[in-house]
Image (cartoon, rainbow, N blue to C red):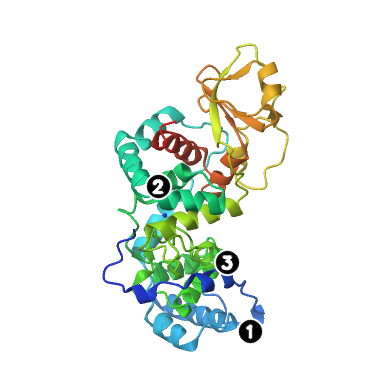
Amino acid sequence: MGPAQAQGAAQRASAIPAAAAVATQAQPVVVHQNALPPVAQPAPAGGAFQQYKLRLTALARAARIREQTIQSVIPGLELSNRVIELDRAQRPRSTAGTSYVPPMAPYIRDHVTSSLITRGQARYAAHWPNLSRIQLRFGVDPAVIMAIYGKETSYGSVTGNFDLLPALATLAYEGRRRAFFEEEFIAALRLLDQGVGRWTLKGSYAGATGYPQFMPSVALRLRADGDGDGYADIWRNEDDAFASIANYLRSAGWKPNVPWGIPVRVAPTLNRTAIQSHLNAPRCAAVFRRHSRWLTVAEWRALGVTPVYRTLPDTELATLMEPDGPGAGGYLLTTNYRAILDYNCSNFYAMSVGLLADRIARR
């Protein structure tokens, strides 16, 4: 789900003017399918990929990518077997007949470590003047910004070394999520059109790039200037990355001055059947299935769900999650937890970000 990226000797000139970042939105690619070359089906041989590059060229031209950019990238693209291997290794195995969810406590121990906490606290203190300005501008908790930065790239030390363009082209060609990765490939070309350096576009095998690990289309829409120098450089400038993460969370519905969630004690008499949510999740159904229906904090208190040490206003709506089941601790989660889920739709991810943020801010 979004932030100094070590991108070699790329020059500052490849950074993007903030005005252009705000004004330029990722444009959907609208192309009549009969105007495109037929889609080559994935095959071990490289010949089919060479044919598929004709489709990428047609898509890029339809999206009005500069011809110079097209010719500097697409003819030299090669299929990445390593990307295919990694993508196939990540595909979920069949879970038919089982609703097993691994326990969260071991995951939290492994992902909210003393190293991440102490390094996060040091970065938080060092960047506090700018983080406080970013908080005023976007309304987002700066500790959550720092926690996402730590979670995504270990505070900028692990940003990925895959060349984004062949990685995205390979994933599009492979076909499992062709439309998605074709759009991300075109978005990456558009970043080049806007002046991002060709070798700045490195990241994960799945296409996430920069300190926030944004997909290219997200970088086009939401990267932001965080230090007032007129540029939005999420690859080398931490303050720009922080502002961009804040901009992402605000766009996902973050509410100012509201915690992501609080730990609670749950009375053994709580009727969990009565608090089940019957809402249809628009995405990530297995993630949201673990959340109760929404009640006010006052209503939760009446049911025997009480804060451990921090509290929320009585009128605040929250949903209950017991990560490891009844009797193993619970959390009342606000809509800001949902904003973190928008960054990465995993309860394991969002809980680790929230708990790391609390430790970074010494709450």
Image quarter hosting the C terminus: top left
Give coordinates of residue 348: x percent, y percent: 48, 37
Badge 1 element: helix
Residue assigned mark 1: 35
Identify residue type, mark 1: Ala
In the foreground, 118 or 176: 118
Look at the numbered disc 2 and give the secondary structure of its residue: helix
Q: Nearer the viewer, mark 2 or mark 1?
A: 2
Characterize the local packing of mark 3: few (<14), some (14-19) or many (20 or more) Cα atoms within 10 angstroms: few
Residues at badges 2 and 1 in contact (C-beta under 8 Å)? no
Where does residue 44 sit, x and y in percent of width and height? Answer: 40, 68
Reply above or below: 291 against 155: above
Q: CA distance from mark 3 to mark 2?
A: 41 Å
Query: Label 3 is placed on what type of residue?
Result: Ala
Cα gap from disc 2 to disc 1, whole angstroms:
53 Å
Outermost residue, left side: 9
Locate residue 318: give its quadrant.
top right
Tell me the number on the disc at residue 151: none
Horizontal arrangement in the rendering, residue 220 relative to residue 10 (left or right): right
Q: Residue at x 51, y 78 (%)?
A: 56
| Above or below, 350 relative to 324 | below
- Examine the rendering and report whether any part of residue 197 can be seen: no
Instruction: Decide which of tag 2 and tag 1 comes sooner along the chain.
Output: 1
Residue 111, by quadrant, is top left
The numbered mark, 1 or 3, whose residue comes first in the sequence reads: 1
Residue 281: which quarter of the image?
top right
Disc 3 target residue: 179
Residue at label 2? Answer: 128
- The amino acid beneath tag 2 is Trp
